[in-house]
Amino acid sequence: MVASAALLLVCFAFSCLARGEVALADACPNAAARTGPSAALEDCRAYERVSPPDANGLPLVESLEGLPRNLFQTELITASGDSFLFRTSGGSLEEPEGNGGLDQYEARRTGEGWVTVRRLNPSGAEAILPNAGGVNASHTYDFYNAQPVSGEDNSGSLTEEGEANYLGNPDGSFELLGVGALGTERLAEGQWITPDGSLIVFTTGGFKCSGSSVCEIKKLEERAPSTGTPAVYQRTPDGLAEVVSLLPGDVTPGDGEAAEYQGVSTDGSVIAFRIGGVLYVRVDGKETKEVAAGTPTFAGITKNGSEIFYVLGGDVYRFEIGTGDTVQLTTTSDVELVNVSTDGSHAYFLSPSQLDAGAGVAGEPNLYVWSEALGIKFIATVSPSDLFGEPSSLNRWTSHVVTPDTNYTTGPGATSSRTTPRGDVLAFESRAKLTGYENAGHNEIYLYRESTGSLSCLSCNPSGEPAIADARFEFIAGPGVSPEAVIHNLTDDGQQVFFETSEALVERDVDGINDIYEWSNDGVGGSLALISSGRSADYVGVFGFRKQTNLIFGITPSGRDVIFNSWDPLVPSAGRGGVPTIYDARVGGGFPEGGAAACAASLCESDALGAPELASPTSHAFRGKGNVRRHRCKRNVQRGHAGKHKTRSCKRRRKAGAKRSSSNALRGQTATAKGDN
């Protein structure tokens, strides 16, 4: 009797339904798939299992953390939401089998579910120690480093002649990356692959050549500098290298005039590089233009290659590539960049000066925005701790986001701000008290909207009680994602923001550990909804270490797909083998998987989602109504021969969810490149 009561309690908490039954209040077109935990999701979302149901007992994680070479900002989920990259460490899946060291896989969404369709890296026979690099936005081409193992037989493998960097092709084959008319360079390092895979950018004289006495830094093309001088090249997948780092007038740099790669536009039409203290751009592979002298700091190229930003002497400049004109955006010589929109119309920055008619606090980190239409406008005075926090900070744009020194600590995840492609909306983290809410020194998520000039707190507890935990866009330390992964925490239209916190912001969140939230602009202050279950167990592994769960791995620019890991069995086929599962909380998604019987077997009898998570709320629980508007459903009670059944009448929420689902389908899909957000 006690066991049956506990089973009923857990099933009710996760909306386990009888076979074939659909919640009466669920008017979503995918209602049949919104059973079990999916029934509690807003916006007609449903959980989908992305990773294999049996991962051979291996942990499944994001795909980019590795050695600092061949890396660039990578979209782990495609803009369409139909392809996702993940990896295993310390072993491989049984199918497709990998090398057993570090294996990177692609899962693809089909009409019947997600399927792991291929391994991107070399097999164990091809390379014993492969290291994953960047993957282009369509998940067709990628970079890989392969190293020989001392004392092992490397004959017949990619490392038979020593370490090398390779280009991975869509058909699973690999070819040397640094190939030119004059020879090959095995240590040429990959920097960028365009979304369509039509152009590849690489350099010579990279990571392994620094201070090396055995690295030749070969000359690969006739116009390139002589052997021993680093250069920047471009090539097509089936073509030979063409030198990029030429001086204006197509003059070849002299001996020792090393070229340093800086960044590239999304389509590869403009490539920035530096020789000495001068910043240059190569346009369409045909013409080199000087941008600025005096050792400027590269600050990004717009998506279409129309402008390049740089910092010089503590001020921000924009160079118009077509006309050659330079615009100085600031004049105080004390500016640190926070973010630059991909269309080049907005730049966010910090300054201790009082700009915008004396707004801000002198000597403190004041956050400003420059826009083409309005000039410089004050947003808020943030906390000094926002500039030096770990693992992300507001002032890391030039040092971590668009830096050419790419490694596993740099990338868009290393900065605590996100902006829309047109720059009119900025979401950012801060420990400062920027609204009337008492954040008690905790990190909160704030939103600035240019159209209204408003600043609002998205993660502040709706109860109004002081904060008890930090909120972040993503946790990139430990088992979290590498900062090189592009995560669209702010949707392209600026209407949704996704973040993580262990603080309960809605009633359904009762687990007291890290959960994923969605904030949506409903026109009346915004609404909050859980993406993760809010009922996860506090998993503890060996030596008492907490097993991290509910971590964001990827979000599409429209916000339709939210990819995350969890130890919770959120669909019937998940949670096997004692390892976490990667899920997609997808608007209009879900796949019917067996109805009530599967729900009872996978959820209702699972220790992971059992009765302890439904105990009385702790100090982390939701604490009443507050300053963030949340739609509540009116409960109806229907009586019948089987007893009392509770359903929810959510006409208002369904209407808003249907409207948002419709708008999600129309949102733009933006790929992100180095120098972009």
Image (cartoon, grey):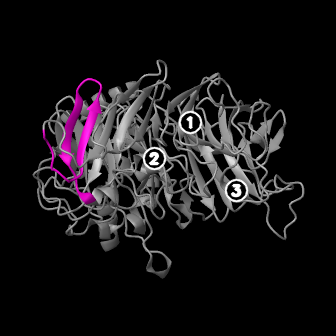
Closest to the observer: 102 or 349? 349
For the residues bearing labels 2 and 3, Cβ distance under 8 angstroms? no
| Type of the residue with mark 1 | Ala
Q: Earlier in the sequence, mark 2 or mark 1?
A: 1
Q: Work out how far the residue at label 3 is from the one at label 1, CA to CA, in angstroms.
A: 26 Å
Mark 3, Cα crowd under 10 Å, few <14 / some 14-19 / many 20+, is: some
Q: Secondary structure at mark 1?
A: loop
Q: Earlier in the sequence, mark 2 or mark 3?
A: 3
The mark that comes first in sequence, 3 or 1, is: 1
> On the image, numbered disc 3 is attached to which residue?
208
Quadrant containing the C terminus in the rendered view? top left
Asked if residue 203 lies left or right of residue 20, the reply is right
Residue 104 seen by the camera: yes
> For the point 40% across and 43% down, which residue is it?
46
**Residue neighbourhood size for the residue with mark 2, other residues' Cα within 10 Å, grouped as few (<14), some (14–19), many (≥20):** many
Three-letter amino acid code of the residue under disc 3: Lys
Q: Is residue 198 magenta?
A: no
On the image, the x and y values in percent for residue 638 come to 18, 45
Q: Between 228 and 60, which is closer to the camera in this rendering?
A: 228
Question: How far across and down, in percent of the image, does residue 418 sit?
Answer: 35, 42
**Residue 137 tag number:** 1
Q: Residue at x 28, y 29 (%)?
A: 371
Measuring from the top left, give residue 245's x and y in whole percent.
65, 34
Residue 370 sits inside the magenta stretch: yes
Residue identifier under label 2: 401
Q: Which residues are magenta?
A: 358-384
From the viewer's perspective, is 15 left or right of 130?
left
Q: Can residue 1 be seen?
A: no
Quadrant of the image for the N terminus?
bottom left
Percent from the top left, x then y, of residue 103? 66, 55
